[in-house]
Structures are given as C-alpha cells and as structure tokens.
Amino acid sequence: MSQTTTVQDAIRLLYILVRGSDQISNHPDGYVGFFDGKAKLHALDFWVRYPDFLAYELLNKYDDTGEEKYLLKAESIIEDQEPDLRSIPMIRYRFGAFENLHESLSLLVSKGLVYQDGDKSDQTIKAYYYYITPLSVQLVDDVTAEFPLLAWYDERAKLVKEIAGPLGGSALKERQYKHMSYATTQLGTQIPS
C-alpha cells in the first residue's frame, strides 16, 4: 500500500467527481454535472483505492446480472495484482472509510474545477454536494488523452459509478460494511486490503 500527496488525491477525486456525477443541463451557473454527497465521494473513493473490495463488488454484480463483463473485470483486477500495486489505505472512522479530503477538494475548488455547496442549518453543514464545471470535464478529457497512464483513473471512476448505481453514500457505506474485514477494523486504524 502506498501514500499519496494532496495533488495526487486531487487528481483521483477529480476523476471520481467528473465521471461519477450525474449530468445536468441548463444550470444558471453553467455547471454540467452534480455529485451528491461527501459520504458517496468517500464510498466511491474507497473502491478506487481498494481494488480487492471492488473486485468483490464486481463478483456480486456478476451474480446479480449474469453479465460476464463483471466477472472478467474482477479477474483482471486480481490477475493484474492491483490489490498489491494500487491500494491506497484509508482509516475506518465512525461512519466507515474516511480520509480528510479538505485540502484536495480545496485545490479543485480554487482552480474553478468543482463548486462545493451544502445544506446548512444551526451554523453547520448537514450535507455536501458538488457541481462539476465544463472546465473540469475538459481537463479530465485532455489529460487522459495526453497522459495515457491516467486512463486507469478514467476507466475506474466510470466503473465505480456503474457499480454504485443510484445508491447514495449511506447505502454504499452499508454495502461496504458487509465485508467482515471492513466491519471489524478498529476505529482509527487502517482498513486492511
């Protein structure tokens, strides 16, 4: 397992936000995508960072649908040794896999790639959501074409969105808690791969 920098985290999160968002049109501020919730962002980020857990979800999807593409993708993840080569640890916190994403998200917000908003009450934010700008979509498309190594993040972000389906963050976290190694990880410690 490896550690990452703020910039590396920002790049990964940008792919997840852009490819994991729902497309919108005619927004008065010109936004082209909407991503609902920080819990969902953590859940999708978890699957990107833990390929072995994603492979398990792909096998479940194969069992549910019978679509061989999910089985083949799960096999590919294991055969390519992604759990050993691409895992990036996360800490189990009160509500599941967690990492403080403020610095990485602030980098995206400060560059005009993402607009972060939320539902506020009693001087606190109760729910976060993110609007995707046309600039962020163009950037993801351009850097993926210019740097083919980043195509992995592009493909993976699309895949985790597909696996998540319409579920929100809480439902996705519930699914992740069905894994014994995830559920039994002590609070404040790394979730094992």
Image (cartoon, rainbow, N blue to C red):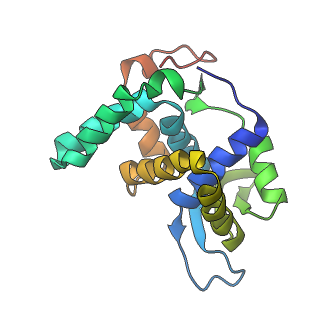
| Residue 158, image x, y percentages | 46, 54
- Residue in the foreground of this view, choosing between 49 and 119: 49
- Residue in the foreground of this view, choosing between 190 and 18: 18
Horizontal side of residue 73 vs 96, given as left or right: left
Can residue 149 be seen in the rendering of this structure?
yes
Q: Residue at x 54, y 62 (%)?
A: 21
- Residue in the foreground of this view, choosing between 165 and 133: 133
Q: Residue at x 65, y 57 (%)?
A: 146
Q: Residue at x 40, y 27 (%)?
A: 52
Residue at the extreme left: 66
**What count of labels does the image hold?**
0
| Residue 141, image x, y percentages | 60, 64
- Residue in the foreground of this view, choosing between 184 and 60: 60
Horizontal side of residue 121 vs 182, given as left or right: right
Horizontal side of residue 64 vs 32, given as left or right: left
| Residue 95, image x, y percentages | 55, 32
Rendered-image quadrant of the N terminus: top right
| Residue 99, image x, y percentages | 67, 32
User: In this picture, is 98 found above or below 150?
Assistant: above
Residue 131 occupies quadrant? bottom right
Residue 36 occupies quadrant? bottom right
User: In this picture, is 187 found above or below 160?
Assistant: above
User: In this picture, is 182 found above or below 133?
Assistant: above
Q: Residue at x 50, y 15 (%)?
A: 185
User: In this picture, is 117 found above or below 58?
Assistant: below
Residue at the extreme right: 110
